[in-house]
Image: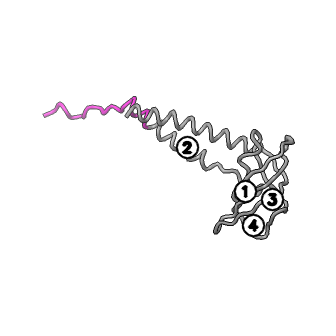
């Protein structure tokens, strides 16, 4: 059990750090205006392909799912999008969508669980002797 909980703790710490880093890069990103070049409707999902110029001057084309009703949008329309600071051509979302901290919270809770398990596995609690164990 020591190995399982210790490995779980280490993996949890690494994944949590990755999620925090990704979320912070997204928070430091920029809102820009993009042009819709393709609209795909798959049932209730709407997939958009948007071409835009990032804040650092790079031309990008990105695909993302639109969660709002975008049936009125078509090819050539303008849409406000948000891209992260480090890699502006990936992880694009609509500017109206909030940041997602849910993966960070879930991984932090899992890491706390693995840390508790590792602590108990490495330092098991000692049960004190019964108060009346030696009495007749």
Q: Secondary structure at mark 1?
A: loop
The quarter in which the N terminus is drawn is top left
Mark 4, Cα crowd under 10 Å, few <14 / some 14-19 / many 20+, is: some
Q: Residue at x 75, y 51 (%)?
A: 62
Report the disc number at residue 36.
3
For label 4, the residue is: 70
Report the disc number at residue 40.
none
Q: Residue at x 74, y 50 (%)?
A: 92
For label 1, the residue is: 97
Q: Position of residue 38 (x, y in %)?
A: 76, 60
Marks 4 and 3 sit apart, C-alpha to C-alpha, by 11 Å
Residue furthest to the left: 136
For label 2, the residue is: 107
Mark 3, Cα crowd under 10 Å, few <14 / some 14-19 / many 20+, is: many
Marks 1 and 3 sit apart, C-alpha to C-alpha, by 17 Å
Marks 4 and 2 sit apart, C-alpha to C-alpha, by 32 Å
Q: Secondary structure at mark 4?
A: loop
Depth check, mark 2 against mark 3: the one in front is 3
Give the residues in magenta. Answer: 117-136
Depth check, mark 4 against mark 2: the one in front is 4
Marks 2 and 3 sit apart, C-alpha to C-alpha, by 35 Å
Q: Secondary structure at mark 2?
A: helix
Q: Are marks 4 and 2 in contact (CB under 8 Å)?
A: no
SS majority, magenta: loop
Residue furthest to the right: 57
Magenta-drawn stretch contains 63: no
- Looking at the image, tell me whether mark 4 or mark 3 is earlier in sequence order: 3
Q: Residue at x 79, y 54 (%)?
A: 81
């Amino acid at each position: 059990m020591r190995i399982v909980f210790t490995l779980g703790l280490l993996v949890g710490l690494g994944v949590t750090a990755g999620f925090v880093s990704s979320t912070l890069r997204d928070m430091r990103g920029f809102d820009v205006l993009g042009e819709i070049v393709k609209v795909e409707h798959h049932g209730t999902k709407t997939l958009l392909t948007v071409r835009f110029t990032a804040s650092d001057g790079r031309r990008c084309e990105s695909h993302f799912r639109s969660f709002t009703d975008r049936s009125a949008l078509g090819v050539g329309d303008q849409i406000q999008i948000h891209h992260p600071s480090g890699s502006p051509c990936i992880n694009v979302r609509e500017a109206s969508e909030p940041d997602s901290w849910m993966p960070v919270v879930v991984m932090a809770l899992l890491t706390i669980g693995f840390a508790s398990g590792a602590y108990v596995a490495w330092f098991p609690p000692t049960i004190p002797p019964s108060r009346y164990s030696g009495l007749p």
